[in-house]
Image (spheres, rainbow, N blue to C red):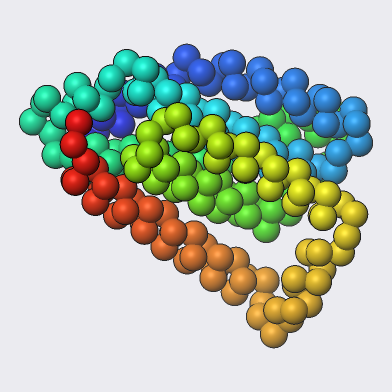
Amino acid sequence: MKQLMMKDFIMQKSQVFLTIALVIGLIIIWYASGTQLELIYLFSGLVISLSLITGGISYDDGNGATLFLLTLPVERKTIVISKYMTGFLTVILGTFLTLILVGILNIVIGSISSPPWTVILGSLMGNLIATALIFAIYFKFGYENIKYMIVGFILLAVIGSVLYTQTNMLDTILKSAYHFSESTLVLIAAIVTLLIYIGSLLFSAQVMKRKEY
């Protein structure tokens, strides 16, 4: 499994610098247009995670990597688990890269503001859920169908940003759950996120087990 994960990270390495350059450009545009820091952080994390994960899947699909792995003495569930572990680590990497880039932005503009810890964790959990859905679609229907899901993520992100900036949606949600503390809500969200991620992994493992190539 370690070798499979190393293979994925080596393939992603060539994309990291391109992705960072893309995100830096987007951060500059967003900041110049007056986008809130929280939204810059959320969008940047999503772009980094999706770019690296879909880039790795695209390489596998274009070069027949999965078909080649099936000719080796490697269990199908091992292929799936390694992909999900790589995805998990990629989301964490994307989170740290986003923190660094946003931190550099704060230094450049002379600001001491930073995203709230709830936004950081929310971005991490949202990207994990997006990754889980992408992998489930990939193993079930193939790479070609992922593009529709990515468009859906982008639309949801845009709609969510509009609701966040133009309404009191977040305050309304928090007030509706006023009897729970902020840390309790985050813990519940984290548990739900992990259940979705593990559920997606088990689903993909079953699909891989039954699929004929």
Query: In front here: 122 or 168?
Result: 168
> In the rendered view, does 124 fall on the left or right side of 30?
left
Eyeballing the image, is 72 above or below 128?
Answer: above
What residue is rendered at 81% in x and 64% in y? 169
Eyeballing the image, is 199 above or below 212?
Answer: below
What residue is rendered at 83% in x and 31% in y? 30
What residue is rendered at 29% in x and 54% in y? 202
Query: In front here: 204 or 105?
Result: 204
Is residue 164 in view?
Answer: yes
| Residue at the extreme left | 73
Is residue 78 in view?
Answer: no
> Quarter holding the N terminus?
top left
The quarter of the displayed image where residue 19 is located: top right
The quarter of the displayed image where residue 175 is located: bottom right
User: How many dots with numbers?
Assistant: 0
> Quarter holding the C terminus?
top left
What residue is rendered at 57% in x and 16% in y? 17
Residue 66 horizontal/vertical position (percent): 25, 27
> In the rendered view, does 95 fall on the left or right side of 59?
right
Eyeballing the image, is 170 above or below 101?
Answer: below
> In the rendered view, does 149 fall on the left or right side of 114?
left
Residue 162 horizontal/vertical position (percent): 83, 49
Residue 158 horizontal/vertical position (percent): 75, 43
> In the rendered view, does 135 fall on the left or right side of 21?
left
Residue 29 horizontal/vertical position (percent): 83, 25
